[in-house]
Amino acid sequence: MPKSPEVYITFDCNIYSKEAVLKACYQLADIAVFDVSSDKNKITVSAMVHSSSDTSADELSNSLKTSVIDYQLREKIEAQTKQVKDILINAALSNALRT
């Protein structure tokens, strides 16, 4: 039986959060098994493609990188819009309670 393709990717902690990396790994859990570790300013992901998957190591690497960027941007947008969301929710609830 041939060994499944293995991928090693390092992310800079100054750019990407551990949560973004973990969410991206979880999103791709149906095609690979992940091991995530962190050391100082880097997060290292090792991944092994499931033997039942047709995904190549390059495809997995590209998908993981894209997903991490996606989740990191979601975090940034959430942080930037949280105050406005809270104001809108409080106004809506206040308005609902008055009626």
Image: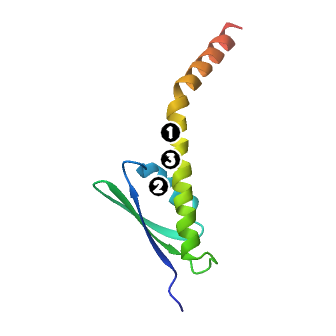
* Three-letter residue code for mark 2: Val
Between label 2 and label 1, give the one nearer the viewer.
1
94 or 37: nearer the viewer: 37
Mark 1 is on which residue type?
Lys
What residue is disc 2 on? 21
Give the residue at x 60% y 67%. Answer: 30
Foreground of the two, 20 or 11:
11
Q: Position of residue 74 (x, y in %)?
A: 55, 43
Q: Are marks 3 and 1 in contact (CB under 8 Å)?
A: yes
Horizontal side, residue 18 vs residue 56: left or right: left
Locate residue 9: give its quadrant.
bottom left
Q: Neighbour class for label 2 at 10 Å: few (<14), some, many (≥20)?
A: many
* Disc 2 to disc 1: CB gap under 8 Å: no
- What is the three-letter code of the residue carrying label 3? Gln
Give the secondary structure at mark 1: helix
Q: Is residue 26 visible?
A: no
Disc on res. 18: none
Up-down relation of residue 98 to residue 10 (above or below): above
**Scheme of colours in the image:** rainbow
Residue, disc 1: 76
* Residue topped by disc 3: 72
SS for dot 3: helix
